[in-house]
Amino acid sequence: MVGWREVAAEFAGTALLLLLAVSAIVAGFAAGSPIVGAVPDEYLRRLMTGVLIPAAAAGIVYSPLGRISGGHLNPAVTTGFWVLGKLTSGSALKYAAAQVAGATTGALGALLVWGHAAVSVRVGATVPRLGGAAAALGAETLMTFLLLTLIFTFVDHPRLMPFTAASAALLVAVLMLAEAPVSGTSLNPARSFGPALVGATWTGLWVYVVAPTLGALAAALLHRRRRGTVACGKLLHDNAYRCRFLNCAYTPPRDRVQRLRRHHYSWREQPKMKAIAVYPGKADSAHLTDVPRPAVTDVPGGHGVLVRVLRVGLDGTDKEINAGEYGTAPAGEDILITGHESLGVVEEVGPAVSEVRPGDLVVARVRRAGGSLYDLIDTPDMTTDEAYFEHGISRVHGFLREYYAEEPRYLIPVPAALRHVAVLLEPTSVAEKGILQAYDIQRRLKVWHPRRAAVLGAGTIGLLATMILRNRGLEVTTFGLEQAPYLNSELVEAIGASYVSTRQTSPAQVAAQGGAFDLVFEATGYSPIVFDAMCGLLAKNGVLILSSVTGGMRRSEVPSDAINLDFVLGNKVMFGTVNASREHFEEGVRDLAVAEARTPGWLSRLLTHPIPGLDRYDDALAALGEPGAIKVYVEVSPDNV
């Protein structure tokens, strides 16, 4: 909860805001003011005031006062953060009292400084104007709702959060220009109460208490419904200043530990768990370590789900991260817990969770929301942010640990009948996204009934893509490097697809003999094959899906004119796909269930290399390169699968 240091800063910030606000009103509208004589146009003076007052508020938020207290300066803002679980009721009352006292002090200071000039403008008091109290009530409610919605949205995203105060100031400036003739544009019960008390102007004061409160409640409840909570209770979180708001997502873990110590809990007393972590950028740094065990209360607002990890699948990404090729640790930490393909069981849920319950099997989505438009609509797999959040890869810990705590919106329930193969859901979702988006894109044709599909690559993603396309009734030819028979070719043929070794026959030869393909799914990890696929492999109106991540510097000479001509005259499409959103995971559950029903045991044959226990992670990495390896996975809780 907030301390007296934060309360004092909130008092001082609000007092300063009112002193500056009333001074701006005196300068712009008091009888005898030089500015009134120099700028006779009232609209221009309102424009000046509408810029100065919000700018002053933003300046206070960015000042040390705002960085200490969070820069609410407004009981409506505090009410909103209280509804979202960032303050206790006691802390919210302290802040509201400090704001009212600060506003009164600031208004009194302005009266002492400006004397009769301040009296002539009622010490900046707000009263209903055009349309009376009803119009003012509606306008103040709507404007406060817009202001709080903007604040919550910006605070919730790391890249937007530094611009919260500036954006709020710009919004208020625009609102003041448009709405001031109706209510005077308060949006702040303290800002109206202080001048009303000092200037003895009580007309319509209730409007400026009720309306901002209603607007704040509406904005907070809507945000809670959409997001559950908000990342922090400050308009500007700065790790150089302590944050006493509840469950702050921006406070680095070490700061959390220091706060626990100040509350007489030692680091040794915190439950520990095992995890596999790397030092990002350092080759061969994977190691077993002890880290704090999460709790369901780590997710604020009662929306936490504590999950015990059962299995974690590995792929080339994990190997490349351990090689130091990429990977980013969470803010304030040196290590990154790896692993992004998970299966777990719910151990405990918070009081606000209804989507899952203890005992449910779940798979976690990999991407987490950032600050782009696509993150805001819950499709972080389509983010335009350069700095994205991805479990076990970028800025968020992965699942090679015994437990994790998560919000239910990032968890995909899995039926018990798929327990033994559900660790395949994450790679399945990647293939699902590419195929579903191909069908979406092909709506451009009005009528599209694909018959033949080619899958380039017979690894995990290629086999799962083959399965998905067969489930949809397509004739599928899967191309792999190795000659048949071997496990991968047998798996392809077991579900009614054809396997072709590219050592013996090229994809172009197959297309020349049997006809071009309506859909081509590339999953080889070998970029030159993309250009082979573009030349003669794809039928007219066809679609080529690229799913491989190739980070090298390989170069190829390609017939660019022929490719361009073929794509233009053939109305062909090529697109890339990465990661997956919730709908793709859910479609993956359905396809896994269909595959298990049609060909029992087929999915289990993909799980070639089980590694028992986190302490044998080196064996898991080594197994990724072994002949015959399709899916390597760690049994984190081997006795429970």
Image (spheres, rainbow, N blue to C red):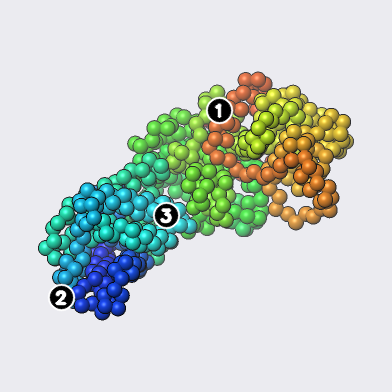
Q: Disc 1 or disc 2, which is closer to the eye?
A: 2
Residue situated in front as seen by the camera: 481 or 186: 186
Q: Amino acid at mark 1?
A: Arg
Three-letter residue code for mark 2: Gly
Q: Which mark is residue 154?
A: 3
Label 3, secondary structure: give it: helix
Whether residue 17 sits left or right of residue 152 in the image: it is left
Tell me how far mark 1 sits from mark 3, CA to CA.
39 Å
Residue 101: % across, % down: 18, 62
Q: Residues within 10 Å of mark 2 (few under 14, many from 20)?
A: few
Q: Which residue does the numbered mark 2 point to in the structure image?
A: 115
Left/right of residue 445 with respect to residue 43 in the rendered view: right
Please tell me which residue is depicted at 48% across the width and 33% down the height of the picture. Answer: 345
Query: Gap in Å between the C-alphas at discs 1 and 2?
Result: 77 Å
Q: Secondary structure at mark 1?
A: loop
Q: Amino acid at mark 3?
A: Phe
Question: Going from the N terminus, do you reach mark 2 or mark 3 first?
Answer: 2
On screen, residue 312 versus residue 631, left or right, reads: left
Say which quadrant the C terminus sits in: top right
Graded by Cα atoms within 10 Å as few (under 14), some (14 to 19) or many (20 or more), the crowding at tag 3 reads many
Residue 53: which quarter of the image?
bottom left
Work out whether residue 148 can be spotted: no
Q: Which residue is mark 1?
A: 419
Residue at horizontal 21%, vertical 72%? 30
| Furthest residue toward front | 40
**SS at mark 2 in the image:** loop
